[in-house]
Amino acid sequence: MPRPPADPADNFQPSYRVSRERLLEKLHGISRRLPVLVDSRSIAPRGPEGETLALDFAIVGARRPKHVLVLSSGTHGVEGYTGSAIQHWALDALLPRLSLGRDTAVVLQHANNPYGFAWHRRVNEDNVDPNRNFRDAFDPNQCSPDYEALYECLNPADLDPANEQRRWAEIQAYVDREGLRRFQQVAVEGQYKFPQGMQFGGHRRSAGTQHLIDLAREHLCAAQTVIWIDFHTGLGESGACELICGAALDSPAYAFAQQVWAGEVRSSQAGESISTPLNGLLDLGIQAVLPADARFAFAFPEYGTWPPERVIRAMRADNWLHHHGDLTDATGLAIKAEMLEAFRPASRDWMRTIVAHGSALVERTVGHLPGAGLAAA
Ligand SMILES: [Zn+2]
Protein backbone atom coordinates (compact mmCIF):
# COMPACT_ATOMS: atom_id res chain seq x y z
CA MET A 1 0.00 0.00 0.00
CA PRO A 2 1.46 3.44 -0.89
CA ARG A 3 2.41 5.62 2.05
CA PRO A 4 1.72 9.35 2.18
CA PRO A 5 4.91 11.38 1.64
CA ALA A 6 6.45 12.86 4.79
CA ASP A 7 6.41 16.31 3.19
CA PRO A 8 2.95 17.19 1.76
CA ALA A 9 4.68 19.24 -0.99
CA ASP A 10 5.86 15.89 -2.40
CA ASN A 11 2.29 15.23 -3.55
CA PHE A 12 3.17 17.60 -6.40
CA GLN A 13 4.51 15.49 -9.27
CA PRO A 14 7.34 16.47 -11.63
CA SER A 15 5.40 16.11 -14.91
CA TYR A 16 2.14 14.99 -16.48
CA ARG A 17 3.79 11.72 -17.53
CA VAL A 18 5.10 10.85 -14.07
CA SER A 19 1.85 11.91 -12.43
CA ARG A 20 -0.14 9.64 -14.73
CA GLU A 21 2.19 6.64 -14.36
CA ARG A 22 2.25 6.86 -10.57
CA LEU A 23 -1.51 7.38 -10.44
CA LEU A 24 -2.15 4.21 -12.45
CA GLU A 25 0.34 2.29 -10.32
CA LYS A 26 -1.30 3.42 -7.08
CA LEU A 27 -4.75 2.56 -8.43
CA HIS A 28 -3.45 -0.95 -9.07
CA GLY A 29 -2.39 -1.08 -5.41
CA ILE A 30 -5.79 0.19 -4.21
CA SER A 31 -7.57 -2.43 -6.32
CA ARG A 32 -6.57 -5.13 -3.81
CA ARG A 33 -8.88 -3.46 -1.29
CA LEU A 34 -11.54 -1.66 -3.33
CA PRO A 35 -12.96 -2.31 -6.81
CA VAL A 36 -11.19 -0.13 -9.40
CA LEU A 37 -12.09 0.54 -13.01
CA VAL A 38 -10.00 2.93 -15.13
CA ASP A 39 -11.52 4.19 -18.38
CA SER A 40 -8.74 5.96 -20.33
CA ARG A 41 -9.55 8.05 -23.38
CA SER A 42 -6.56 9.26 -25.32
CA ILE A 43 -6.23 12.22 -27.67
CA ALA A 44 -4.16 12.35 -30.86
CA PRO A 45 -1.18 14.55 -29.86
CA ARG A 46 1.74 13.24 -27.81
CA GLY A 47 3.54 14.74 -24.84
CA PRO A 48 7.07 16.20 -24.81
CA GLU A 49 8.58 12.76 -24.14
CA GLY A 50 6.45 11.07 -26.77
CA GLU A 51 4.03 9.81 -24.13
CA THR A 52 0.35 9.08 -24.64
CA LEU A 53 -1.94 11.91 -23.59
CA ALA A 54 -5.18 10.69 -22.04
CA LEU A 55 -8.05 11.48 -19.73
CA ASP A 56 -8.05 8.75 -17.06
CA PHE A 57 -11.43 8.33 -15.38
CA ALA A 58 -10.63 6.09 -12.40
CA ILE A 59 -13.70 4.77 -10.59
CA VAL A 60 -12.96 3.46 -7.10
CA GLY A 61 -15.95 1.62 -5.63
CA ALA A 62 -19.27 0.92 -7.32
CA ARG A 63 -19.55 0.68 -11.09
CA ARG A 64 -22.37 2.94 -12.30
CA PRO A 65 -22.57 4.43 -8.78
CA LYS A 66 -25.69 5.98 -7.30
CA HIS A 67 -23.60 8.32 -5.17
CA VAL A 68 -20.30 9.66 -6.40
CA LEU A 69 -17.61 12.16 -5.54
CA VAL A 70 -15.47 13.21 -8.52
CA LEU A 71 -12.09 14.89 -8.06
CA SER A 72 -10.80 16.21 -11.39
CA SER A 73 -7.60 17.91 -12.43
CA GLY A 74 -6.03 19.80 -15.29
CA THR A 75 -9.00 21.41 -17.04
CA HIS A 76 -6.56 24.26 -17.58
CA GLY A 77 -3.61 22.04 -18.43
CA VAL A 78 -0.69 23.40 -16.42
CA GLU A 79 -3.02 24.00 -13.46
CA GLY A 80 -3.21 20.19 -13.33
CA TYR A 81 -0.18 19.95 -11.04
CA THR A 82 -2.39 21.12 -8.19
CA GLY A 83 -5.40 18.90 -8.87
CA SER A 84 -3.10 15.96 -9.42
CA ALA A 85 -1.35 16.63 -6.09
CA ILE A 86 -4.73 16.34 -4.36
CA GLN A 87 -5.45 13.15 -6.32
CA HIS A 88 -2.12 11.66 -5.22
CA TRP A 89 -2.90 12.68 -1.65
CA ALA A 90 -6.29 10.96 -2.01
CA LEU A 91 -4.68 7.76 -3.28
CA ASP A 92 -2.10 7.66 -0.46
CA ALA A 93 -4.03 9.08 2.46
CA LEU A 94 -7.79 9.11 1.80
CA LEU A 95 -8.75 5.95 -0.08
CA PRO A 96 -6.93 3.61 2.36
CA ARG A 97 -9.13 5.00 5.17
CA LEU A 98 -12.35 5.05 3.18
CA SER A 99 -15.22 2.59 3.39
CA LEU A 100 -17.70 2.66 0.54
CA GLY A 101 -21.24 1.30 0.42
CA ARG A 102 -22.16 -0.91 -2.53
CA ASP A 103 -23.69 2.02 -4.48
CA THR A 104 -21.01 4.60 -3.77
CA ALA A 105 -17.81 5.52 -5.60
CA VAL A 106 -15.02 8.06 -5.65
CA VAL A 107 -13.76 9.01 -9.11
CA LEU A 108 -10.32 10.45 -9.77
CA GLN A 109 -10.49 12.05 -13.20
CA HIS A 110 -6.83 12.77 -14.07
CA ALA A 111 -6.07 15.48 -16.67
CA ASN A 112 -9.19 16.93 -18.26
CA ASN A 113 -6.78 18.65 -20.66
CA PRO A 114 -3.76 16.34 -20.88
CA TYR A 115 -2.11 18.30 -23.71
CA GLY A 116 -2.06 21.52 -21.69
CA PHE A 117 -0.84 19.66 -18.59
CA ALA A 118 2.02 17.99 -20.47
CA TRP A 119 3.04 21.06 -22.48
CA HIS A 120 2.45 23.65 -19.73
CA ARG A 121 -0.36 25.52 -21.42
CA ARG A 122 -3.76 26.51 -20.01
CA VAL A 123 -5.37 25.77 -23.36
CA ASN A 124 -5.55 22.49 -25.23
CA GLU A 125 -4.10 21.24 -28.54
CA ASP A 126 -6.64 23.39 -30.46
CA ASN A 127 -5.63 26.59 -28.60
CA VAL A 128 -9.05 26.24 -26.95
CA ASP A 129 -9.76 27.04 -23.32
CA PRO A 130 -11.62 23.85 -22.28
CA ASN A 131 -13.57 25.72 -19.63
CA ARG A 132 -15.18 27.82 -22.38
CA ASN A 133 -15.80 24.83 -24.67
CA PHE A 134 -18.67 22.99 -22.93
CA ARG A 135 -21.58 24.04 -25.08
CA ASP A 136 -23.83 22.63 -27.77
CA ALA A 137 -23.64 25.48 -30.29
CA PHE A 138 -20.74 27.72 -31.31
CA ASP A 139 -21.16 31.13 -32.89
CA PRO A 140 -17.91 32.10 -34.70
CA ASN A 141 -18.84 35.78 -34.34
CA GLN A 142 -19.28 35.70 -30.58
CA CYS A 143 -16.76 38.16 -29.16
CA SER A 144 -17.17 41.37 -27.21
CA PRO A 145 -16.41 44.58 -29.13
CA ASP A 146 -13.95 45.50 -26.37
CA TYR A 147 -11.96 42.26 -26.83
CA GLU A 148 -11.89 42.96 -30.55
CA ALA A 149 -10.66 46.52 -29.96
CA LEU A 150 -7.94 45.22 -27.61
CA TYR A 151 -7.11 42.21 -29.81
CA GLU A 152 -3.65 43.30 -30.88
CA CYS A 153 -2.74 44.35 -27.33
CA LEU A 154 -3.84 41.01 -25.88
CA ASN A 155 -2.46 38.87 -28.70
CA PRO A 156 0.68 40.54 -30.04
CA ALA A 157 2.37 39.16 -33.14
CA ASP A 158 5.81 40.30 -31.94
CA LEU A 159 7.59 41.10 -28.66
CA ASP A 160 9.37 44.22 -29.97
CA PRO A 161 9.98 46.36 -26.83
CA ALA A 162 8.66 49.61 -28.34
CA ASN A 163 5.50 47.90 -29.60
CA GLU A 164 5.02 46.17 -26.27
CA GLN A 165 5.33 49.46 -24.40
CA ARG A 166 2.61 50.98 -26.58
CA ARG A 167 0.34 47.94 -26.13
CA TRP A 168 0.65 47.92 -22.34
CA ALA A 169 -0.03 51.66 -22.30
CA GLU A 170 -3.24 51.00 -24.25
CA ILE A 171 -4.25 48.24 -21.83
CA GLN A 172 -3.53 50.53 -18.87
CA ALA A 173 -5.61 53.31 -20.44
CA TYR A 174 -8.48 50.83 -20.86
CA VAL A 175 -8.20 49.73 -17.20
CA ASP A 176 -8.10 53.39 -16.04
CA ARG A 177 -11.19 54.15 -18.10
CA GLU A 178 -13.29 51.01 -17.52
CA GLY A 179 -11.89 49.47 -14.33
CA LEU A 180 -9.89 46.29 -13.67
CA ARG A 181 -13.00 44.13 -13.21
CA ARG A 182 -14.30 45.11 -16.65
CA PHE A 183 -10.87 44.36 -18.15
CA GLN A 184 -10.88 40.93 -16.47
CA GLN A 185 -14.36 40.26 -17.86
CA VAL A 186 -13.36 41.25 -21.41
CA ALA A 187 -10.04 39.41 -21.35
CA VAL A 188 -11.21 36.08 -19.89
CA GLU A 189 -14.96 35.57 -20.48
CA GLY A 190 -14.30 33.49 -23.61
CA GLN A 191 -14.39 34.53 -27.26
CA TYR A 192 -15.31 32.39 -30.26
CA LYS A 193 -14.06 34.55 -33.12
CA PHE A 194 -10.25 34.42 -33.04
CA PRO A 195 -8.73 30.90 -33.06
CA GLN A 196 -5.25 32.28 -32.33
CA GLY A 197 -6.42 34.60 -29.58
CA MET A 198 -6.37 34.07 -25.83
CA GLN A 199 -9.52 32.64 -24.26
CA PHE A 200 -10.68 31.08 -27.50
CA GLY A 201 -13.70 28.85 -26.76
CA GLY A 202 -13.54 26.84 -30.00
CA HIS A 203 -15.67 26.36 -33.08
CA ARG A 204 -16.68 22.86 -32.00
CA ARG A 205 -16.23 20.62 -29.01
CA SER A 206 -12.60 19.59 -28.61
CA ALA A 207 -11.71 15.90 -28.25
CA GLY A 208 -11.12 16.18 -24.50
CA THR A 209 -14.43 17.98 -23.95
CA GLN A 210 -16.27 15.24 -25.81
CA HIS A 211 -14.38 12.52 -23.89
CA LEU A 212 -15.31 14.03 -20.55
CA ILE A 213 -18.95 14.42 -21.52
CA ASP A 214 -19.02 10.79 -22.75
CA LEU A 215 -17.33 9.51 -19.58
CA ALA A 216 -19.84 11.33 -17.39
CA ARG A 217 -22.77 10.17 -19.50
CA GLU A 218 -21.68 6.52 -19.55
CA HIS A 219 -20.41 6.02 -16.01
CA LEU A 220 -22.71 8.36 -14.10
CA CYS A 221 -25.90 7.26 -15.86
CA ALA A 222 -27.41 5.85 -12.64
CA ALA A 223 -26.26 8.67 -10.38
CA GLN A 224 -28.56 10.20 -7.80
CA THR A 225 -25.90 12.25 -6.05
CA VAL A 226 -22.94 13.80 -7.90
CA ILE A 227 -20.49 15.97 -6.00
CA TRP A 228 -17.67 17.20 -8.23
CA ILE A 229 -14.56 19.21 -7.39
CA ASP A 230 -12.41 20.50 -10.29
CA PHE A 231 -9.15 22.07 -9.09
CA HIS A 232 -7.79 25.33 -10.56
CA THR A 233 -5.02 27.84 -9.87
CA GLY A 234 -4.02 31.36 -10.89
CA LEU A 235 -6.76 33.61 -9.51
CA GLY A 236 -6.79 35.23 -6.07
CA GLU A 237 -4.27 35.95 -3.30
CA SER A 238 -1.29 33.59 -3.12
CA GLY A 239 -2.33 30.36 -1.39
CA ALA A 240 -5.91 31.53 -0.79
CA CYS A 241 -8.83 29.50 -2.07
CA GLU A 242 -12.23 30.47 -3.40
CA LEU A 243 -14.84 27.84 -4.27
CA ILE A 244 -16.51 28.92 -7.51
CA CYS A 245 -19.47 27.39 -9.31
CA GLY A 246 -21.11 28.34 -12.59
CA ALA A 247 -24.67 27.60 -11.43
CA ALA A 248 -27.27 30.36 -11.30
CA LEU A 249 -28.34 31.56 -7.85
CA ASP A 250 -31.88 30.21 -8.21
CA SER A 251 -30.81 26.73 -9.45
CA PRO A 252 -30.99 23.46 -7.46
CA ALA A 253 -27.26 22.96 -8.21
CA TYR A 254 -26.41 26.19 -6.41
CA ALA A 255 -28.62 25.23 -3.44
CA PHE A 256 -27.01 21.76 -3.17
CA ALA A 257 -23.52 23.26 -3.50
CA GLN A 258 -24.35 25.64 -0.64
CA GLN A 259 -25.50 22.66 1.40
CA VAL A 260 -22.33 20.65 0.76
CA TRP A 261 -19.88 23.51 1.16
CA ALA A 262 -21.90 25.47 3.75
CA GLY A 263 -21.83 29.01 2.51
CA GLU A 264 -18.32 28.78 1.01
CA VAL A 265 -19.27 28.52 -2.64
CA ARG A 266 -19.61 31.62 -4.89
CA SER A 267 -21.50 31.82 -8.17
CA SER A 268 -19.45 33.36 -10.98
CA GLN A 269 -22.61 33.96 -13.04
CA ALA A 270 -24.14 36.03 -10.26
CA GLY A 271 -21.04 38.20 -9.81
CA GLU A 272 -20.45 36.87 -6.27
CA SER A 273 -17.00 35.57 -7.09
CA ILE A 274 -13.53 36.89 -7.93
CA SER A 275 -14.23 35.12 -11.23
CA THR A 276 -16.30 37.16 -13.68
CA PRO A 277 -19.15 35.43 -15.62
CA LEU A 278 -17.79 32.96 -18.19
CA ASN A 279 -19.09 31.20 -21.31
CA GLY A 280 -19.14 27.42 -21.91
CA LEU A 281 -18.29 26.22 -18.39
CA LEU A 282 -17.52 22.57 -17.69
CA ASP A 283 -19.99 22.18 -14.82
CA LEU A 284 -22.97 23.18 -16.93
CA GLY A 285 -21.83 20.83 -19.73
CA ILE A 286 -21.50 17.89 -17.33
CA GLN A 287 -24.79 18.57 -15.61
CA ALA A 288 -26.59 18.42 -18.95
CA VAL A 289 -25.72 14.70 -19.39
CA LEU A 290 -26.48 13.53 -15.84
CA PRO A 291 -29.85 11.99 -14.99
CA ALA A 292 -32.34 14.86 -14.75
CA ASP A 293 -33.24 14.06 -11.14
CA ALA A 294 -29.65 13.69 -9.88
CA ARG A 295 -28.58 16.05 -7.12
CA PHE A 296 -25.51 17.88 -8.43
CA ALA A 297 -23.04 20.01 -6.50
CA PHE A 298 -20.01 21.37 -8.30
CA ALA A 299 -17.13 23.60 -7.24
CA PHE A 300 -14.00 24.95 -8.89
CA PRO A 301 -11.56 25.58 -6.02
CA GLU A 302 -9.40 28.41 -7.35
CA TYR A 303 -6.03 28.76 -5.60
CA GLY A 304 -4.19 32.06 -5.92
CA THR A 305 -0.60 32.08 -7.14
CA TRP A 306 0.72 35.51 -8.24
CA PRO A 307 -0.88 38.94 -8.86
CA PRO A 308 -3.24 39.08 -11.89
CA GLU A 309 -0.92 41.12 -14.07
CA ARG A 310 1.89 38.55 -13.78
CA VAL A 311 -0.54 35.72 -14.56
CA ILE A 312 -2.00 37.52 -17.60
CA ARG A 313 1.49 38.40 -18.86
CA ALA A 314 2.48 34.73 -18.65
CA MET A 315 -0.60 33.56 -20.59
CA ARG A 316 -0.17 36.29 -23.16
CA ALA A 317 3.50 35.43 -23.76
CA ASP A 318 2.65 31.73 -23.98
CA ASN A 319 0.03 32.48 -26.62
CA TRP A 320 2.62 34.47 -28.58
CA LEU A 321 5.15 31.63 -28.24
CA HIS A 322 2.87 28.92 -29.60
CA HIS A 323 1.88 30.98 -32.65
CA HIS A 324 4.97 33.01 -33.43
CA GLY A 325 7.92 31.75 -31.38
CA ASP A 326 10.27 28.79 -30.92
CA LEU A 327 9.68 26.48 -27.96
CA THR A 328 13.35 25.49 -27.86
CA ASP A 329 15.20 28.83 -27.90
CA ALA A 330 16.10 30.89 -24.81
CA THR A 331 13.01 33.13 -25.09
CA GLY A 332 10.75 30.11 -25.50
CA LEU A 333 12.25 28.28 -22.52
CA ALA A 334 11.94 31.39 -20.34
CA ILE A 335 8.27 31.81 -21.30
CA LYS A 336 7.52 28.16 -20.50
CA ALA A 337 9.30 28.45 -17.13
CA GLU A 338 7.25 31.55 -16.28
CA MET A 339 4.06 29.78 -17.35
CA LEU A 340 4.78 26.99 -14.87
CA GLU A 341 5.60 29.45 -12.10
CA ALA A 342 2.44 31.47 -12.75
CA PHE A 343 0.17 28.44 -12.29
CA ARG A 344 2.30 26.12 -10.11
CA PRO A 345 4.69 28.21 -8.04
CA ALA A 346 7.96 26.47 -7.13
CA SER A 347 7.56 27.53 -3.48
CA ARG A 348 7.33 24.42 -1.27
CA ASP A 349 5.39 26.47 1.30
CA TRP A 350 2.80 27.34 -1.34
CA MET A 351 2.47 23.64 -2.18
CA ARG A 352 2.04 22.69 1.50
CA THR A 353 -0.65 25.34 1.94
CA ILE A 354 -2.56 24.05 -1.07
CA VAL A 355 -2.36 20.38 -0.03
CA ALA A 356 -3.46 21.27 3.53
CA HIS A 357 -6.47 23.18 2.23
CA GLY A 358 -7.37 20.77 -0.57
CA SER A 359 -7.14 17.65 1.57
CA ALA A 360 -9.32 19.21 4.31
CA LEU A 361 -11.83 20.30 1.66
CA VAL A 362 -12.05 16.77 0.26
CA GLU A 363 -12.39 15.20 3.72
CA ARG A 364 -15.24 17.58 4.61
CA THR A 365 -16.89 16.85 1.27
CA VAL A 366 -16.72 13.06 1.80
CA GLY A 367 -18.94 13.65 4.83
CA HIS A 368 -21.75 14.64 2.43
CA LEU A 369 -21.39 11.57 0.20
CA PRO A 370 -24.06 8.95 1.03
CA GLY A 371 -22.51 5.53 1.71
CA ALA A 372 -18.99 6.83 2.40
CA GLY A 373 -17.25 6.54 5.75
CA LEU A 374 -13.83 7.82 6.73
CA ALA A 375 -11.68 6.35 9.50
CA ALA A 376 -9.56 8.80 11.51
CA ALA A 377 -6.08 9.48 10.12
ZN1 LIG B 1 -8.33 27.33 -14.30
Image: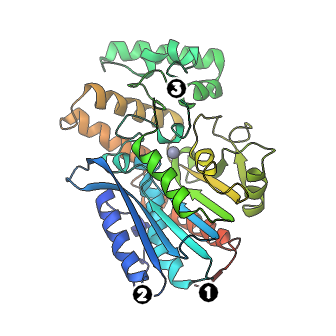
Residue that carries the numbered disc 3 in the rendered image = 191
Image point 44% across, 28% down: which residue?
198
Disc 3 packing (10 Å; few <14; some 14–19; many ≥20): many
User: How far apart are the alpha carbons under marks 3 and 2?
Assistant: 47 Å
Q: Residue furthest right?
A: 250
Mark 2 CB lies closer than 8 A to ligand 1: no
Q: Say what secondary structure mark 3 lies in.
A: loop
Point out residue 74 in the picture as x, y percentages from the top left corner: 45, 52
Mark 1 CB lies closer than 8 A to ligand 1: no
Q: Quick one: label 3 or label 2, which is nearer the N terminus? A: 2
Image quadrant where one finds the N terminus: bottom left
- Answer left or right for 161 relative to 344: left
Image point 24% across, 33% down: which residue?
331
Residue 38 sits above or below residue 133 on the image = below
Point out residue 228 in the picture as x, y percentages from the top left corner: 60, 59
Disc 2 packing (10 Å; few <14; some 14–19; many ≥20): few
- Which quadrant of the view contains residue 314? top left
Residue that carries the numbered disc 2 in the rendered image = 32
Residue that carries the numbered disc 1 in the rendered image = 375
Residue 42 sits above or below residue 36 on the image = above
Hey, what amino acid is under mark 3? Gln
Q: Quick one: label 1 or label 2, which is nearer the N terminus? A: 2
Q: Are marks 3 and 2 in contact (CB under 8 Å)?
A: no
Disc 1 packing (10 Å; few <14; some 14–19; many ≥20): few
Q: Say what secondary structure mark 2 lies in.
A: loop
Q: Nearer the viewer, residue 190 or 213?
A: 213
Q: Nearer the viewer, residue 345 or 120?
A: 120
Residue 292 in view of the camera: yes
Residue 354 sits above or below residue 116 on the image = below
